[in-house]
Amino acid sequence: MITYRATVDVPRELVAYVASLLRAHRRALGTRKGTRQLTPYRQAVFGLVWFRNRGVDIGQLGAGFRISRATSYRYHDEVVAVLAAQAPNLSDALERVEADGWSHLILDGKVVDSDRYAEKTVSKKGKTIDAYYSGKTHDFGGNIQALMRPDGFPIWISDVAPGSVHDLVVARIAGFGRDLPAAWGPSLGVVRGVARDR
């Protein structure tokens, strides 16, 4: 077996921030010091390396950190969870829109590829179908919707819904109702895929 050192292009401040989130998460769980294979800092590095190299196999990445495949998946999921907990909810995102006075917003979605899930559901026609199979992409995946500022930077992302669920239904489940634009004031309107001035 050959070992080597590698460098990941993320700032130390980001690693320290993620490590602080992991430390707080471990305290909340009541995890005793010295009982984990990686320190919060090393786990933060592990998670950020995965984010920067999304094609890498988690088990192989874990081997570089001398942790098992199962532990690699657990640590990966934990990093994703503590970061996801920092994301703003829809109300916070809309308050920011109002405070910053943006002229319009973009609401758009995507079906993200995933492994096939065994979950079944019943279609509108009464047939049993794979919940995560998307007729739009003709593949398995999860449907997410994102609210973006005018330059395209996302300010809010929905929870993942099964790929068989239509974009507009996912948006409605997330809190976009017919009367939602009125809550922002009469000057702003939102339509699927694009938001524009009324």
Image (cartoon, grey):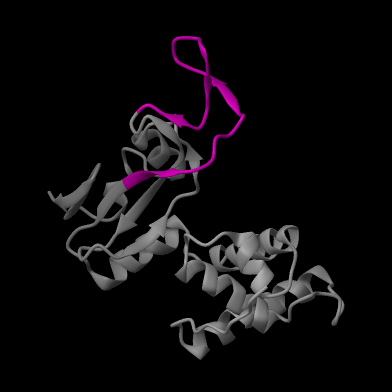
In this view, the residue in front, 184 or 131, is 131
Residue 7, above or below 85: below
Q: Position of residue 14 (x, y in %)?
A: 51, 83
Q: Residue 122, how many percent across, how many down?
A: 53, 17
Residue sitting at 44 percent across and 43 percent down? 113
Relative height, residue 117 to residue 121 (above, below): below
Say which of 66 and 104 sits in front. Answer: 66
Residue 104 in magenta?
Answer: no
Q: Quadrant of residue 66?
A: bottom right
Toward which corner of the image does residue 156 lie, by quadrant?
A: bottom left
Quarter of the image with the N terminus in it: bottom right
- Magenta span: 109-135
Residue 85: % across, % down: 57, 64
Residue at image position (51%, 11%) is 127
Q: In this rendering, would 143 be left or right of 104?
A: right
Residue 188 vs 110, above or below: the answer is below
